[in-house]
């Protein structure tokens, strides 16, 4: 019997408790929560693990924990840490005044590069220049929110390098350039709509700055005080490229016969409590760590200081997501078991089901669950993509891909860069909205855009 069949629905209660803690504790016990986030995450993890171990035995508990920590969490946090350190060593120097026009340019640049350096890479590279450009403003949280919407999420939709769900699709047979060929119209329309809304809101907030704000803007814009824009720490781009190569090799090595153990059909490696640690896994981790260390030791401390580099954003992500990953075990197990039998069989249903679950669960396994469900349905007579899970209709694959990537912007935990951008902004003095207030922003801005996507592409 599959684990998901025997787990009761209430077993997801610790996961819900973890999410509510992230949403509520900063509001009611903010100072305590900031100091004891790891304690809170471990509390909810143990609330799940202790009864789970009693009910299913230490062997199954060890296997599930090993799959989560070794198979998912370590690669996840190592990749984020590598991108955080390397991008933190690249300093874009010069005068960028936070006008509406310049903010739009920065948002568009970030959206354009996110599919090639990953949403995390693009976000870590540009969030600090965006904050510096707008340091003169009192009202700037909306800029960071749109940055999360566009750079940390939607911009990663074009290639498997942009967002992990698409990379998992690539490993399961979806051609590398399939997504860019089919999803670019959605990205263009969504980007245009969000830029239009952003321009309207940004001009509104600039007016709210008052005379003092206008005086600051005038001072920032003086031509004789402008510093030419240039990139410092440019050698870190080579380390960024090394991280991208590591991710590509992780997917390429299992496809090369020379690395495959004929007895098991898997890459050469070892088993740790049922979790396979293959050469592909080791190569990715080692290369990312090498890139990170080279970046750290070859980039001056003065440059990182001018870049306002600090460890708090990545440590907070590491603390909270260990609790999220562990408490998410029963939710994903139930979803894997029943995901193909919940009556989802149209592009519209796949778009919203994949997207809404990706807003709160890890969008990578959610993508795989619905891709597998779509493979079981078959092409249904239309154009199809042949994958390792079966033939998937083009409209359904497009819906799954867009839902997993786009709707990760709905919450702070929908995609890891969201939390990192929020933390960096708060460290820079920006008063970001709470968990629920951020969801109100996404409800008012993103959901109408997703409804337009539905009407245009998924009916």
Image: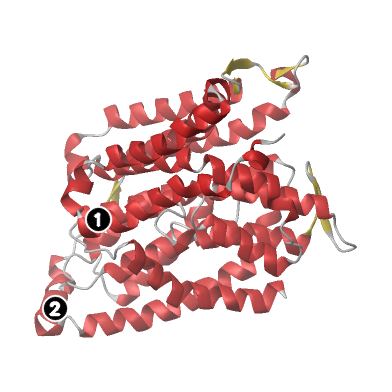
Q: Nearer the viewer, residue 333 or 170?
A: 333
Question: Along the line of sight, which residue is nearer the eye, 391 or 113?
Answer: 391
Q: Nearer the viewer, residue 95 or 351?
A: 351
2 vs 1, front mark: 1
Position in image of residue 453 (x %, y %): 61, 74
Q: Residue 388 placed where, x, y %?
A: 78, 41
Residue at figure coordinates x 79%, y 50% from the top left: 375
Residue 413 relative to residue 300: left or right: right
Query: Is mark 2 in CB contact (under 8 Å) with mark 1?
Result: no
Quadrant (top left/top right/bottom left/bottom right) for the N terminus: top right
Q: Position of residue 402 (x, y in %)?
A: 61, 61
Q: Residue at x 64, y 64 (%)?
A: 351
Question: Is residue 183 toward the left or the right of residue 137 in the image?
Answer: right
Does residue 106 show up?
A: no
| Distance from the alpha carbon under mark 2 to that under mark 1 | 30 Å
Assess disc 2: are there few (<14), some (14-19) or many (≥20) residues with their C-alpha within 10 Å of its C-alpha: some
Q: Which mark is residue 213?
A: 2
Image disc number at residue 437? none
Q: Quadrant of residue 383?
A: bottom right
Secondary structure under the numbered disc 1 in the rendered image: helix
Q: Say if residue 395 shows up in the picture.
A: yes
Q: Count residues near mark 1 (Cα–Cα under 10 Å), then give few for <14, some for 14-19, many for 20+.
A: some
Q: Residue beneath label 1, please?
A: 26
Q: Position of residue 3 (x, y in %)?
A: 64, 36
Which quadrant would residue 81 be assigned to in this image? top left
Indicate which disc, 2 or 1, sits on the residue closer to the N terminus.
1
Q: Vertically, is 66 above or below 36?
A: above
Is residue 333 placed above or below 354 in the rendered structure?
Answer: above
Residue at (67% x, 78% y) in the render: 456
* Residue drawn at x 62%, y 46% as measured from the top left: 334
Q: Secondary structure at mark 2?
A: helix
Q: Nearer the viewer, residue 328 or 419?
A: 328
């Amino acid at each position: 019997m599959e684990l998901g069949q025997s787990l009761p629905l209430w077993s997801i209660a610790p996961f819900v408790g973890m999410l509510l803690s992230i949403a509520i504790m900063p509001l009611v016990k903010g100072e305590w929560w900031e100091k004891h986030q790891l304690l809170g995450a471990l509390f909810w993890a143990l609330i799940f693990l202790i009864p789970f171990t009693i009910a299913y035995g230490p062997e199954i508990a060890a296997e599930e924990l090993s799959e989560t920590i070794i198979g998912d969490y370590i690669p996840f946090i190592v990749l984020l840490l590598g991108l955080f350190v390397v991008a933190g060593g690249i300093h874009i120097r010069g005068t960028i005044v936070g006008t509406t026009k310049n903010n739009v340019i920065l948002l568009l640049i970030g959206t354009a590069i996110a599919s090639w350096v990953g949403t995390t890479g693009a976000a870590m590279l540009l969030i600090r220049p965006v904050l510096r450009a707008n340091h003169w403003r009192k009202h700037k949280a909306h800029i960071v929110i749109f940055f999360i919407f566009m750079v940390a999420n939607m911009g990663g939709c074009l290639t498997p390098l942009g967002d992990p769900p698409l990379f998992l699709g690539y490993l399961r047979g979806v051609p590398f350039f399939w997504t860019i060929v089919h999803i670019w119209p959605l990205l263009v329309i969504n980007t245009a709509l969000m830029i239009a809304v952003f321009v309207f809101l940004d001009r509104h907030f600039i007016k709210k700055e008052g005379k003092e704000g206008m005086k600051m803007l005038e001072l920032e814009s003086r031509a004789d005080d402008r510093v030419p824009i240039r990139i410092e720490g440019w050698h870190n781009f080579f380390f960024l490229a090394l991280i991208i190569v590591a991710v590509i090799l992780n997917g390429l090595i299992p496809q090369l016969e020379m690395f495959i153990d004929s007895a098991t059909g898997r890459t050469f490696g070892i088993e740790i409590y049922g979790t396979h640690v293959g050469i592909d896994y080791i190569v990715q981790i080692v290369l990312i760590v090498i890139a990170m260390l080279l970046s750290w030791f070859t980039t001056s401390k003065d440059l990182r200081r001018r870049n306002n580099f600090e460890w708090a954003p990545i440590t907070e992500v590491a603390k909270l997501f260990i609790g999220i990953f562990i408490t998410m075990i029963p939710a994903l197990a139930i979803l894997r078991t029943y995901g193909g039998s919940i009556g989802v069989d149209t592009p519209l249903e796949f778009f919203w089901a994949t997207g809404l679950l990706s807003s709160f669960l890890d969008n990578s396994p959610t993508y795989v669950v619905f891709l597998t469900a779509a493979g079981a349905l078959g092409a249904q007579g239309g154009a199809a993509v042949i994958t390792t899970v079966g033939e998937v209709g083009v409209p359904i694959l497009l819906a799954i891909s867009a839902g997993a990537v786009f709707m990760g912007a709905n919450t702070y935990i929908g995609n890891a860069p969201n939390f990192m951008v929020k933390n960096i902004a708060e460290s820079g003095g920006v008063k970001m909205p709470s968990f629920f207030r951020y969801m109100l922003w996404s409800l008012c801005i993103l959901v109408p855009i997703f409804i337009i996507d539905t009407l245009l592409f998924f009916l």
